[in-house]
Amino acid sequence: MLISKPEAMKKLSSILLIGGLLLSAGCEKMLETELQGADLTEEEAIQSKQDVLDILQSCYDVTANVYNGRIQYLGELLGDNLVEPTINEDLTEVYNHNTLFFNGTIGGIYQDPYITAFRANRIIEVLADFDFSEAEEAQTIAEARFLRAISQWEVLKLFAQPYGFTNNNGHNGIIYKTTTQEQIVPRDPVGTNYAAIIADLEAALPNLPQSSDYYASQDAANGYLAKIYFQAGNYTKAIEHADAVINSGRYSLGTSIDRFEIDTVNVTEAVFSTTSNSTLRDFRSTGFTDNYRSDVNADPIFKATLEFYNTYAADTSDRRIKDFFELVDEEVVLVKKFNQEFFDIPVIHLTDLKLLRAEAIAESGGDLSVAIQDVNDIRQRAYNSSLNDLPSGASASEIIAAARYERRIEMFGEGDRIQQLKRRGAIEGENTEVRNDPWDCNGMIIQFPISEQTTEFELNPTGGC
């Protein structure tokens, strides 16, 4: 980021309303809404280089809202880690694999990534009108492309069937927004979406700083590319991008098993995070804390399944099961992992990349010694010893099983599990079921808000699984 975080400005608040951003921010209806409540026109609001940078900063602000736990818990609810949520009917629809287009919770979550994309696109469109140096312009465009890519990637994973669902990946994806122009267009194919996201991140890479805790960087872009290629089954490219981060020496697992730390703690494995601010009481982790915390609520909305707990509970030396979960009355599994008032959200982190690389190496016939060490690094931290290490002669299938076992508990609550089950079904051909529903049934993707439907935009099938 070219500037430090600016103070809130009346001028910026006007920019945030431009283009109907309070409503259907993701699609062809982006500009149909009349601007309401704004004190300035766009021409008045965007008058300087600093104004453009303020909009860029606001993209990070909205990205923190996207990753505050809400986008993650939609993924968790589709998977097999959680029991049926209490109280909230919108979330129960997701859990039951049968979402409807009037689901207000989904509509609110769906909006934020496209707000980021809209603002990022506007930055790119107006940048040439202001006094940016060549280097500043290149970095600003790179950050904008990074932000629009990762935002729309999160939408794609939840609202479309995965890469590999069809042989040519021609099945419906999302509208990948690269302009603020009003357009009525159909959804792009998933294969086209993947190509566009990868193109944005690859183009951004050379013009980003090497590393940065909370802003776009080469390490963050490589981390996302590793995850995207992994989901597409391109394990060679996934390894290449994971290597770029892991082998940099800039990150370490450390001794703590807790990645979700307050803003004053340096999480050494975090590559890209969103941040809360304790001084301003600006907490960007409420999607986690409002729904999981068991220290302030005896009956939180989200609890783990017995199946998940029993998969790990017999191993009493595993610090993760003891520190992050609690069995009550032999049937209720409370989650302690998020029992803090607030914390930073590590979105790209070393644990994910090591387990990703281990499985990718084993799937593609790479150097198994590297994969074994990646798994053992995770296990040594979890057990505080090397007694549970994979042996040096472990086979590819043993590495894959171990990496998947570690991934499920390490990334509990982070929205990862369902994507792995879908990848295994679509790419690896496994006959995967999620709570007795096939991985590829209609209900395994979330329904778009009804406001998206046009003569060109086709909603997802209804009726669930």
Image (cartoon, rainbow, N blue to C red):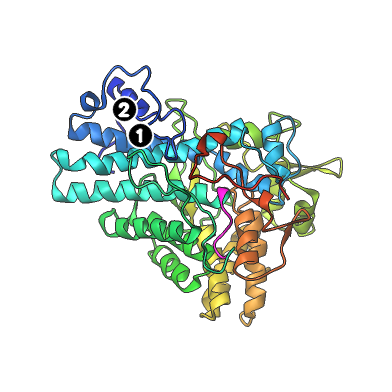
Q: Is residue 214 above or below residue 87?
A: below
Q: Which quadrant would the N terminus be assigned to in this image? A: top left
Query: Is label 2 or label 1 in front?
Result: 2
- Residue highlighted by disc 1: 58
Q: Is residue 170 above or below residue 281?
A: below
Q: Main secondary structure of the magenta part?
A: loop
Q: Secondary structure at mark 2?
A: helix
Q: Earlier in the sequence, mark 2 or mark 1?
A: 2
Q: Which residues are magenta?
A: 159-164
- Residue highlighted by disc 2: 15
The three-letter code of the residue at mark 2 reads Ile
- Is disc 1 surrounded by few (<14), some (14 to 19) or many (20+) residues within 10 Å? many
Between 309 and 67, the residue placed more toward the observer is: 67
Report whether residue 391 is seen.
no
Q: Are marks 2 and 1 in contact (CB under 8 Å)?
A: yes
Q: Position of residue 110 (x, y in %)?
A: 52, 38
- Based on the picture, tell me whether residue 381 belongs to the magenta stretch: no
